[in-house]
């Protein structure tokens, strides 16, 4: 395997794809690469490849060694070895010391804490150098171990995709250019090039989960079940990743279609657009929703299922989530975010009201009384902005609810749609009145903005459906302002 070519192709892909990330990158050919080098054979091979690319003028290069403080003198030896090698090849060197035990979170394993803190350290180094590409020496055998570990712990289809070749690391990009190469390829490359490296004695300690997978379970699986188990697990990861990327794109399209409003940590979405999806897509849409507004938080499968079960019900309800978040369902609108923010936002809106076939009730925030009854389709319609006739199915749900940012209506006589906010602006509705203005809806569709705009949907003419007459008996002062 030509590993130089593999790394060059990875860098070329970054050149082509970096325009899809936010912010300014250096000009073509001047990418700053940070190589995460532990001193082991894998990372020393990566360093050799990147040093050759640096010498060819393809990139700038910094070597970063993270000292975990876990192996005493052996760890000091590795740090000194990497630094000496970097100096020999005239490569900028930085070492970062971390204290794994001091910054280990409650319930977190040493392995997990070391990995988290290592990436944090690499990101901090990158921040001092501008926008960077951070490269690690993860290879195909690491990928096989990752997939097997996730299978044993229990994972989603996305988890079966293992490690991705590239992902964001803060405002930088993390790349694993050796992910398609196996350990045997790297050792052969090191032998051919005469690349020295250090041996980490902790890699043999079976108290660490990854070591038990590598030294115990995988050899047994090779011997007793499948001599090519590593390749099978890597192939599974490749297939799962491609399918996950496709389904994530589909889920993202569905999420965009139901967004109403999205803040820093809160969101409102229309539930019918999720409720009608297959179960697999429902989970993905909800997971993306939580990720978008709570990217730094950890979400459990139980959180996703709690939301999914609630939106399967009509009416209202709420579910308490981890991280002191809450999901509130009000009249097919899902409000989600930190409990204090969501409950405050929900309290600021009046409760939506379902419109029965024969109804008479008040909407106090608007000082309106609503009167509705089933009627025969009239031959003539009164030209009033405060009453309307709708062709309606027996089981169809009509609801008066507060308008929401992003709501659109297709005005009668128009082919396209119009933002309700623009309807307010055109009619010069005072902002104080807009905050609690009511609209009549059928599912996701807005049928009527009383006093302002009637949609071209559910028209009585040439319809065989039953007809409902709806009147707004509004405060005369309010009518006068409109």
Image (cartoon, helix red, strand yellow):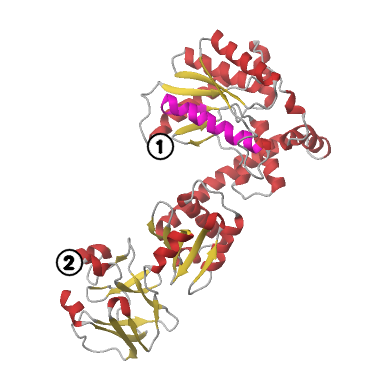
Task: Residue 7: say if magenta.
Answer: no
Left or right: 365 in relation to 163: left
Q: Which residue is mark 2?
A: 428
Q: Could you tell me how far apart the alpha carbons at marks 2 and 1 are, in whole angstroms?
A: 40 Å
The crowding category of the residue bearing disc 1, from other C-alpha atoms within 10 Å (few below 14, some 14 to 19, many at least 20), is few
Predominant secondary structure, magenta span? helix
Measured along the vertical axis of the image, is residue 441 above or below residue 359? above
Task: Name the residue nearer the viewer: 295 or 138.
Answer: 295
Measured along the vertical axis of the image, is residue 46 above or below residue 221? above
Residue 280 visible in this rendered orientation of the protein? no
Mark 1 falls on what kind of element? loop
Residue ID at (52%, 15%): 51
Residue that extends furthest to the bottom in the rendered view of this protein: 376
Residue that extends furthest to the right in the rendered view of this protein: 224
The crowding category of the residue bearing disc 2, from other C-alpha atoms within 10 Å (few below 14, some 14 to 19, many at least 20), is few
Q: Which residue is mark 1?
A: 21
Task: Name the residue nearer the viewer: 350 or 451.
Answer: 350
Left or right: 353 in relation to 6: left
């Amino acid at each position: 395997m030509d590993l130089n070519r593999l790394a060059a192709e990875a860098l070329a892909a970054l050149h082509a794809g970096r325009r899809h990330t936010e912010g300014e990158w250096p000009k073509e050919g001047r990418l700053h690469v940070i190589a995460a080098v532990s001193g082991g054979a894998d990372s020393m091979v990566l360093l050799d490849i990147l040093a050759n690319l640096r010498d060819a003028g393809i990139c700038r290069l910094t070597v970063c060694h993270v000292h975990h403080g876990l192996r005493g003198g052996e760890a000091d030896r590795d740090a000194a070895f990497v630094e000496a090698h970097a100096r020999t090849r005239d490569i900028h060197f930085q070492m970062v010391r971390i204290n794994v035990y001091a910054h280990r979170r409650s319930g977190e394993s040493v392995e997990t804490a070391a990995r988290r803190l290592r990436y944090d350290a690499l990101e901090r180094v990158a921040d001092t150098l501008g926008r960077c590409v951070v490269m690690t020496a993860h290879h195909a055998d690491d990928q096989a171990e990752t997939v097997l570990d996730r299978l044993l712990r229990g994972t989603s289809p996305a988890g079966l995709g293992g490690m991705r070749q590239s992902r964001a690391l803060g405002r930088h990009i993390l790349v694993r250019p050796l992910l398609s190469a196996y350990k045997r390829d790297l050792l052969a490359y090191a032998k051919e090039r005469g690349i020295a490296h250090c041996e980490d004695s902790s890699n043999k300690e079976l108290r660490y989960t990854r070591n038990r997978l590598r030294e115990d379970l995988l050899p047994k699986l090779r011997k007793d079940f499948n001599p090519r188990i590593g390749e099978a697990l890597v192939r599974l990861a490749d297939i799962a990743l491609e399918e996950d990327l496709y389904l994530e794109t589909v889920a993202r399209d569905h999420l965009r279609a139901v967004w109403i409003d999205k803040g820093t940590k809160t969101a409102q979405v229309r539930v019918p657009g999720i409720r009608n999806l297959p179960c697999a897509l429902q989970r993905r849409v909800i997971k993306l929703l939580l990720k978008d507004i709570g990217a730094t938080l950890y979400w459990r499968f139980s959180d996703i299922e709690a939301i999914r079960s609630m939106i399967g019900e009509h009416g209202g309800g709420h579910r308490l989530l981890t991280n002191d978040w809450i999901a509130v369902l009000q009249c097919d609108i899902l409000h989600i975010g930190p409990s204090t923010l969501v409950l405050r936002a929900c309290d600021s809106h009046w409760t939506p009201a379902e419109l029965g076939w024969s109804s008479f009730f008040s909407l106090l925030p608007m000082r309106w009384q609503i009167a509705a009854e089933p009627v025969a389709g009239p031959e003539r319609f009164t030209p009033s902005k405060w009453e309307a006739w709708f062709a309606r199915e027996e089981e169809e749900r009509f609801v008066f609810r507060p308008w929401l940012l992003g709501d659109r209506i297709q005005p009668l006589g128009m082919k396209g749609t119009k933002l309700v906010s623009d309807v307010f602006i055109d009619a010069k509705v005072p902002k104080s009145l807009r905050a609690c203005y009511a609209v009549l809806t059928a599912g996701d569709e807005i049928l009527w903005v009383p006093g302002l705009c009637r949609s071209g949907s559910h028209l009585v003419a040439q319809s065989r459906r039953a007809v409902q007459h709806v009147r707004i008996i509004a405060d005369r002062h309010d009518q006068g302002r409109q």
